[in-house]
């Protein structure tokens, strides 16, 4: 169980769910030309999860000092799992992820895609060891990687299957995946900033230079408050432009995405304590999950 917590099994399940929804709820039911069979797609999911798990492990290894202050009851590396074991697991997950990425890239006839897995693996290490200490840079980089976990489905499923006849359809569905990736990126940026505010004490002691450390907890909260309006306005625009004819779809977005985003914004403006920001971090993750689950309602939109 300690190793499962080390690799953040709940987060990995969420990544797997997001990728599953993209293939089996968004693409497959509409007869879209796709590249991977069930086995190939399973390998793509395993590849993504292995690299993500490696990222969580190396992050915990480098965060030992800060975690002892920020979340002493949840420290794993150095307590229930030795640092040596953590490094071994990091290497194993990375090797499996990169090798499977190499195989998949050749399987779909796009050997250049292999570079993507190498870059992801490298960025996760650089993020944990250096980038997360820089103002906003680490927040943006890790959020791009979260978005890539969605875009990679479009890259491997749609692009290799493009023909002159289906080009427009393939592009339409790739744009849908990209839109969801942008939503995931923005929500993750907000969540990363909230976590930085929550962890300001430990980060400061470790000599990091996050946004809350640079401008103060209150100002950082106001910046996050302002950024949170971006996904809210984008979702409202998206629903008003593409889904306004479907009342059940609109109701879903109003209840499970737009209303929680408004609540998040209000609470961000009022948040003061570490407990407040811990709650907001969980709320942001829940909004991201319900945002992805909205893919289920696309059959009402695309078949209209």
Image (spheres, rainbow, N blue to C red):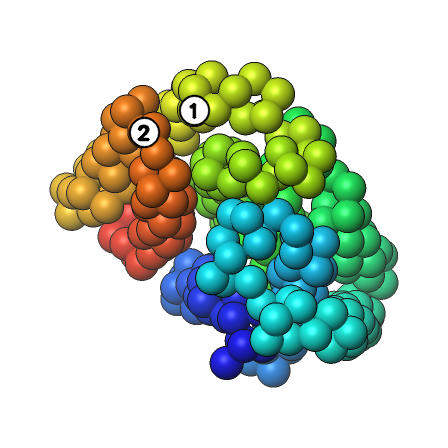
Report whether 99 appears left or right of 249: right
Out of 4 and 284, give the one closest to the viewer: 4
Report whether 67 appears left or right of 130: left
* Residue 140 visible: no
| Residue to which mark 1 is pinned | 221
- The reply to whether dot 1 and dot 2 touch (C-beta < 8 Å) is yes
Q: In this view, does 111 lie above or below 266?
A: below
| Residue to which mark 2 is pinned | 271
Assess disc 1: are there few (<14), some (14-19) or many (≥20) residues with their C-alpha within 10 Å of its C-alpha.
many
Residue at x-position 18% and y-position 43%: 255
* Residue 65 visible: yes
SS label for mark 2: loop
Q: Position of residue 131 (x, y in %)?
A: 74, 39
Q: Where is residue 27 in the image (x, y as percent from the top left)?
A: 46, 61
Residue at x-position 52% and y-position 20%: 216
Out of 19 and 62, give the one closest to the viewer: 62
Which numbered disc, 1 or 2, marks the residue that appears first in the sequence?
1
């Amino acid at each position: 169980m300690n190793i499962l917590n080390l690799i953040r099994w709940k987060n990995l399940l969420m990544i797997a769910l997001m990728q599953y929804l993209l293939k089996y709820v968004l693409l497959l039911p509409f007869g879209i030309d796709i590249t991977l069979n069930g086995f190939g797609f399973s390998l793509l999911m395993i590849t993504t999860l292995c690299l993500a798990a490696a990222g969580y492990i190396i992050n915990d290894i480098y965060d030992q000092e800060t975690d002892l202050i920020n979340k002493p009851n949840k420290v794993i590396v150095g307590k229930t799992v030795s640092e040596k074991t953590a490094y071994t697991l990091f290497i194993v997950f990375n090797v499996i992820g990169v090798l499977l990425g190499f195989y998949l890239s050749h399987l779909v006839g796009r050997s250049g895609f292999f570079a993507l897995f190498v870059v992801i693996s490298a960025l996760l290490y650089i993020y944990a060891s250096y980038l997360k200490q820089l103002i906003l840079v680490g927040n943006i980089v890790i959020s791009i990687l979260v978005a890539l976990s969605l875009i990679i489905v479009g890259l491997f499923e749609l692009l290799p299957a493009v023909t002159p006849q289906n080009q427009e359809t393939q592009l339409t569905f790739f744009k849908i995946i990209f839109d969801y990736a942008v939503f995931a990126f923005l929500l993750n940026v907000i969540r990363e900033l909230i976590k930085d505010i929550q962890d300001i004490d430990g980060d400061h002691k470790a000599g990091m230079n996050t946004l809350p450390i640079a401008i103060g907890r209150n100002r950082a909260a106001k910046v996050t408050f302002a950024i949170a309006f971006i996904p809210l306005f984008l979702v409202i625009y998206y629903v008003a432009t593409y889904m306004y004819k479907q009342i059940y779809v609109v109701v879903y977005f109003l209840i499970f995405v737009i209303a929680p985003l408004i609540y998040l914004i209000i609470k961000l403006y009022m948040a003061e304590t570490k407990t407040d920001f811990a709650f907001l971090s969980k709320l942001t993750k829940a909004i991201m999950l319900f945002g992805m689950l909205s893919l289920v309602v696309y059959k009402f939109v695309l078949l209209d």
